[in-house]
């Protein structure tokens, strides 16, 4: 599948002078049932998050507020995405190494995940990840 299977998805946006509304439905706007939602906030300037890959998990990453970059790597290619709108989400498939950086002040990163937390689903060592993807 690789980094080219990861893409920006435009989410529904309902414009209203009182404030806009965006919604996300599992199996409708993302190609998986949403089993877990988590978010990153108060990330200090210059910090990085991520630094792992998942064996099975799929995610949709959304910049709810502010902006940040997502660097994706499949062991052969890298692709960088800049997220800065709450009505766009980055679909990240399994077996993709991801790093998040360049967080703006006050940014909030929300992640919708296809599975519950399972530590055994992670590759946290980049060399181990490379060994696995270069064998596949």
Image (cartoon, rainbow, N blue to C red):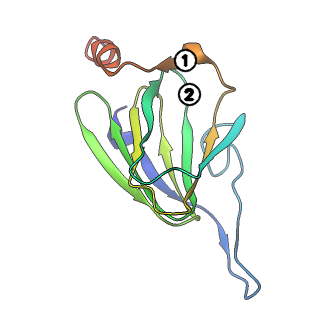
Residue at 71% x, 36% y is 36
- Would you place residue 22 above or below residue 3 in this image? below
Tell me which corner region of the image, top left, top right, bottom left or bottom right, holds residue 111.
top right
Residue at 40% x, 36% y is 98
Disc ID at residue 34? none
Residue furthest toward the left?
76
Residue furthest toward the bottom?
17
- Earlier residue among tags 2 and 1: 2
Task: Give the foreground label among 2 and 1.
Answer: 1
Residue at 56% x, 62% y is 106
- Would you place residue 11 above or below residue 135 in this image? below
Q: Check disc 1: other Cα within 10 Å, few if <14, some if 14-19, many if 20+.
A: some
47 left or right, relative to 14? left
Mark 2–mark 1 Cα distance, whole angstroms, equals 7 Å
- Would you place residue 71 above or below residue 130 in this image? below
Q: Check disc 2: other Cα within 10 Å, few if <14, some if 14-19, many if 20+.
A: many
Tell me which corner region of the image, top left, top right, bottom left or bottom right, holds residue 52.
top left
Residue 79 versus residue 30: which sits nearer the camera?
79
> Which quadrant, please, contains the N terminus?
top left
Residue furthest toward the right?
18
Find out whether the residues at labels 2 and 1 contact each other: C-beta distance under 8 Å: yes
Report x, y in % for residue 38. 67, 41
Report x, y in % for residue 13. 65, 71
Residue at 43% x, 54% y is 45
Disc ID at residue 121? 1
Which residue is label 2 attached to? 57
Whether residue 34 is visible here, answered yes or no, is no
Secondary structure under tag 2 reads loop
């Amino acid at each position: 599948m690789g980094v080219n299977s990861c893409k920006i998805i435009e989410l529904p946006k309902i414009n209203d002078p009182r404030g806009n509304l965006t919604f996300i439905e599992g199996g409708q706007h993302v190609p998986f049932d949403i089993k877990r939602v988590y978010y990153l906030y108060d990330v200090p300037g210059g910090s990085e998050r991520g630094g792992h890959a998942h064996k099975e998990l799929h995610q949709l990453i959304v910049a709810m507020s502010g902006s940040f970059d997502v660097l994706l790597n499949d062991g052969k290619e890298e692709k960088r995405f800049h997220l800065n709108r709450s009505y766009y989400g980055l679909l990240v498939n399994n077996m993709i190494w991801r790093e998040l950086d360049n967080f703006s002040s006050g940014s909030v990163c929300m992640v919708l995940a296809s599975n519950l937390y399972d530590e055994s689903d992670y590759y946290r060592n980049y060399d181990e990840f490379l060994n696995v993807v270069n064998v596949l």
